[in-house]
Structures are given as C-alpha cells and as structure tokens.
Amino acid sequence: MTSPVPVPASGPGAILDVRGLRKVYAGQGRSVEAVRDLTFGVAPGELVCIVGPSGAGKTTLLRCIAGLLDLTAGSVELSGRKVAGPPEGMAVVFQEYGRSLFPWLTVRQNVELPLKEKGLAKADRRAKVAEALEAVGLTDSAGAHPWQLSGGMQQRVAIARAVAYEPQVLLMDEPFAAVDAQTRADLEDLVRTLWQRLGVTVLFVTHDIDEAVYLGQRVLVLSNRPTVILEDVKVDLPDERDQLNTRATPRFAELRHHVYELIQQAKQGRRPDGEEAP
Ligand code: ADP
C-alpha cells in the first residue's frame, strides 16, 4: 500500500473544494451563526474525518456540502462544479438508518431505487445491486424488508445503496452513532474495506475521536461554534488497519491524545492562532 499523496488545502487537484463556507441560520428576530469560515479540500480517493464538539456545526457543514442547505457565504465545488442543490456525484449516509430506508421496499429495491432515478437499464441495475449487497455481506438478505433486519444490517443496506450509486464523494454523517459497539467496529472496517476496494472519496463526520483516528487519513478538528478548523491532523498510520492491533499502537495513542486535547481546547473556546474570538 502506498502512503497518501500530499493534499492541497483547497484548489486544483481537490475533488471536493470548500471555500470560505459560512452558514447563519436566520430565525424570527434571532440568528445563529453555525459555521463561520471553513476552507479545505479533499483529494480524489481520500478518506477524511471531521470531528468537533457537539453543536459545533458538523451536521450543518455536511448538509451544506451535500447541497441540502443554502450557504450564507462561500462555495462548495465538486470536481470543479459549484454545488447548488444535491449534486449527482454525491451520496449521503445519515445516522438514522431507520428513517432513510423505505420499510415497504425490500433490501434489493431500496438499493435499486436511486439507480432507477439515475436512469440505468434493468440489467445494469441488477448487476450493481448484487455487487453492492455482496460488498456489504447482505446477499442473503436481498429479499428481506428493512424492519426484519438488525440496526447494523439496516445501516449496511444504506451503505450498499450509497456505493451502488457509484458516487464521486460519499458523505457520512455520524453513521454509526446509533449502533452497538461491536457492530460499530465491524461497520468501521466495512467502510475502510469499501474505500480501499472502490477507491471512493469519503468525508466522514463523527463526534467519536477514536473512530476519526482509526478511519481517517486526515482528521479535521473543528472549533466550537461559530465553526472554523482548529487543526488539520494528518493520520500517519499504515493503510492496513485492524481494530485490535492498530488501536494498540503507540502512534494511535499519540494521535488520539492530540485530537482529544484539541477537542478539549475547542470546548473551552480556543480559536485558531490569529483569529478573533467571537
Ligand atoms: P453538530 O452536528 O456539530 O452537533 P449542528 O450542525 O447540528 O452541530 O448545529 C450547529 C449549531 O447550529 C447548533 O448551535 C444548533 O443549535 C444550530 N442549528 C442547527 N440547525 C438549526 C436550525 N435549523 N435553525 C437554527 N439553528 C440551528
């Protein structure tokens, strides 16, 4: 396995380019500045995690990137094209798998639906659905309905649906926050396996520091609201990772410690050097 190529902070070479992103929620007489100023790039084929304290604006950021929320200022570009509404080349996996799958459709039909919307021919759809279900280990459950499956299996259906769509960028918003620890570890490994096998670019939001370090090639640590990037941490662990050995290495412990400290500082209101306090 080769080590990741150096990544541009933003600009040419980034498949996802976020510049000066600001989001203010405007309410009746009251506004909330959720995200102040975010600039970063994600290179093709990279796996980047975003961590930050609760309420830091992680979900807001992801929804802005996915074209689900209007930006107050700044821009998001996917492969050089401005995102203004959900773009074709992105798929999102949310935390609430229960709400993201259609209970009246089978597993196979759930995975197939976006491919139908994309206009793929039936034979092509069948092949892609079978491949995606095989990749997440759910071939035998293709005819089941989501409510007949465990939470972890339902989330695997959501992942299969996203990868079958063959997105350029896969966005994941705390996808494993609602499953038990054992299932979560299995799903983390599934994400790394799919990422390596399919070469998809992944942006993974989590509040779990260990998860971010275990999964990512980089971890973007966010400040408290209004959000800016506190540090872009390079995760220089080997590409081959496993739950027992990787987490037991001194380097994993160091990185975890560093990100943990940053989050503590973020909670206490630390801003990047030179940035004015809100
Ligand atoms: P995180 O995902 O990091 O927990 P969020 O993106 O959910 O953070 O929220 C960031 C901030 O924006 C919070 O202070 C939250 O209360 C506020 N916020 C989120 N959604 C809305 C909304 N629709 N209207 C007003 N404020 C919101």
Image (cartoon, grey):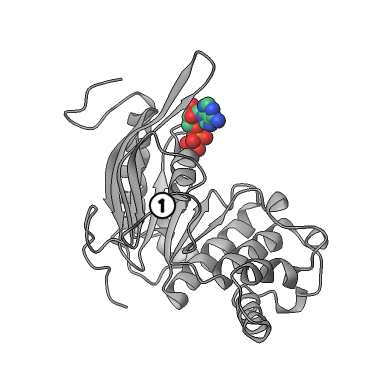
Work out which residue is located at the far left of the displayed protein and give it. 274
Which x, y percent locates residue 150? Answer: 75, 59
Dot 1: element: loop
Q: Nearer the viewer, residue 47 or 104?
A: 104
Corner quadrant of residue 143: bottom right
Pointer 1 residue Cβ closer than 8 Å to ligand 1: no
- Can the viewer see residue 203 in this picture? yes
Judge left or right: residue 253 versus residue 102. Answer: left
Kindly identify which residue carries mark 1. 83
Q: Which residue type carries mark 1? A: Val
Which x, y percent locates residue 69? Answer: 49, 41
Which x, y percent locates residue 278? Answer: 30, 20
Total label count?
A: 1
Corner quadrant of residue 4: bottom left
Judge left or right: residue 59 versus residue 16. Answer: right
Compared to residue 266, the image places residue 2 above or below, namely below
Q: Residue at x 54, y 16 (%)?
A: 28
